[in-house]
Amino acid sequence: MKAVIPVAGWGTRFLPATKAMPKEMLPLVDKPVIQYIVEELLDAGIRDIVLITGRHKRAIEDHFDLNPELEAHLERSGKFELLEVVRKISRLVNPVFIRQKEQKGLGHAVLTARPALGNEPFVVALGDIVVKGANTVSRMLSIFSEYGRSVLALFEVPPDEVSKYGIAKVCPVGDGVYRIEEVVEKPSPEEAPSNLAVVGRYLFTPTILEKLEKTPPGKGGEIQLTDAIAALLEEEEVYAFKVDPGSVFDTGNKLDYLKTVITFALEREELKEELERFLRELLNRQRSIP
Ligand code: UTP
């Protein structure tokens, strides 16, 4: 199966950092966000990855390419461990890059992948959401092989945060699998049919592409993937499962990005102790300032 990672968005919530640099290249300690997502797909056995990029996203293409000068430099200076790290990235995947010429929204970005997809089911993984550990994509693949329909990963969010996400109403069908009854893009807490948010990991039958083609611009004037999923629901069942909210890391906004960096850094042996000490001291110092 192929996977699409849309990475063409402006990343306006991170300006000016994202003026010339893709937000998907922001580091989580020393590895860019996009590499975590590619590794998550590889863990589920997916190697054919279509990246939907834009003019200001060339760094992503370079990241997955060879860099002979850097490799020669690391070899000359005897930095063999780093050399292996750098080489491994270009061997990880054989990516296909397609340009989304105008940033017309996530739905439009997914539709842009169509020439690379054929009439086959495919996975979509958002380029700014990292899902750790839970092997979410493998679970999606196994639900697809049982039900033969599209599958979404969902997670519970606090009721006052529903307006940040696509929200789904579900009914259980057994074994931790749910059937989706309704999806709404960024509803107000009053309108929200539940507090189950779409994580940013999807497996779609190719029917979604037909629906996307007919989807008019929605919230924010963008072609919304959620609107196409709502249209898909009128024709096919769509299934879902829940992932642990603690395994979902949104790196597309400043606060959640900072929380993610700190969490990931505290998991690193070489950083943990010093960083914990620093954070404790920092908080104590701030508390003592009247
Ligand atoms: P977001 O809405 O989080 O990204 O889209 P954005 O538009 O870059 O962010 P802000 O709101 O301006 O800060 C989720 C994913 O979809 C991609 C983004 O790159 C991100 O990985 N995307 C979004 C596209 O590929 N094309 C688009 O037109 C919009």
Image (tube, rainbow, N blue to C red):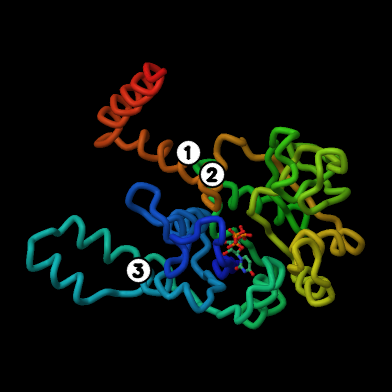
The kind of secondary structure element at disc 1 is helix
Question: Which quadrant of the figure contains the C terminus?
Answer: top left
Res. 172 mark: none
Q: Residue at x 50, y 79 (%)?
A: 55
- Extreme residue toward the front, this view: 290
Question: In front: 108, or 186?
Answer: 186
Left-right relation of 175 to 282 = right
How crowded pointer 3 is (Cα within 10 Å; few <14, some 14-19, many 20+) is rated as: few
* Residue with the mark numbered 1: 259
Q: Amino acid at mark 1?
A: Lys
Q: Earlier in the sequence, mark 1 or mark 2?
A: 2
When asked about the image quadrant of residue 281, the answer is: top left
Q: Is residue 251 above or below residue 233?
A: above
Q: Amino acid at mark 3?
A: Arg
How crowded pointer 2 is (Cα within 10 Å; few <14, some 14-19, many 20+) is rated as: some
Residue 12, percent across and down? 56, 61
* Residue with the mark numbered 2: 249
Disc 3 from disc 2: Cα separation: 26 Å
Residue 52, percent across and down? 56, 73
Disc 1 from disc 2: Cα separation: 8 Å
Left-right relation of 235 to 194 = right
Q: Amino acid at mark 2?
A: Phe
Residue 106, percent across and down? 67, 66
**Mark 3 sits near ligand 1, with its Cβ under 8 Å away:** no
Question: Which quadrant of the figure contains the N terminus?
Answer: bottom right
Q: Residue at x 7, y 63 (%)?
A: 77
When asked about the image quadrant of residue 157, the answer is: top right
**Mark 1 sits near ligand 1, with its Cβ under 8 Å away:** no
Asked if the residue at tag 2 contacts the one at tag 1, i.e. Cβ–Cβ closer than 8 Å, the answer is yes
Q: Marks 3 and 2: which is nearer the front?
A: 2
* Residue with the mark numbered 3: 91
Q: Marks 1 and 2: which is nearer the front?
A: 1
